[in-house]
Image (spheres, rainbow, N blue to C red):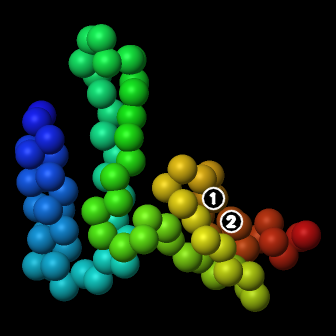
Amino acid sequence: MTEADLKDEQQSVVEHFKQQGVTVDTLVFLTVSTHKGSGDGASSVTTVTGDGVIYEKIFDLQFRVSSEAFFQVSLVFLSHVFAKV
């Protein structure tokens, strides 16, 4: 894909959510290169909308999570972990 194709694809995702009536605060786009000579598995993250982070609140704690951070996506499980700590 060309850079222009990637930009078009990113905007089509944004438009899809808008048409569905979904509010998206932050949307990041991960590009993984599989082209020979570009470094196997080289990747880049592009922030399409928002500030590139999401905020999750667990109990009285608020977490700022970037696209490069590990975060337990099962909030039910994460709540159980925090309840034990």
Percent x, y for residue 62? 67, 80
State which tag comes first along the sequence, 2 or 1.
Answer: 1
- Asked if 58 appears above or below 73 in the picture, the reply is below
Horizontal placement of 25 versus 11: left or right? right
Percent x, y for residue 19? 11, 79
Question: 77 and 56: which one is in front?
Answer: 56
Viewer-nearest of labels 2 and 1? 1
Spatial separation of the CA atoms under disc 2 and disc 1: 8 Å
Question: 53 and 73: which one is in front?
Answer: 53
| Amino acid type, mark 1 | Gln
Horizontal placement of 11 versus 24: left or right? left
User: Mark 1 — residue?
Assistant: 72
Mark 1 residue element: loop
Quadrant in which the C terminus is drawn: bottom right
Mark 2 residue element: helix
- Identify the residue at image location x=19%, y=73%: 17
User: Could you say which quadrant of the image residue 50 lies in?
Assistant: bottom left
User: Mark 2 — residue?
Assistant: 77
Residue that lies at the very extreme toward the bottom in this rendered image: 60
Percent x, y for residue 49? 30, 70
- Asked if 26 appears above or below 36 in the picture, the reply is below
- Identify the residue at image location x=8%, y=45%: 4
| Amino acid type, mark 2 | Phe
Horizontal placement of 32 versus 15: left or right? right
Question: 20 and 70: which one is in front?
Answer: 70
- Identify the residue at image location x=29%, y=83%: 23
Whether residues under marks 2 and 1 lie with C-beta atoms below 8 angstroms apart, the answer is yes
Percent x, y for residue 48? 28, 62
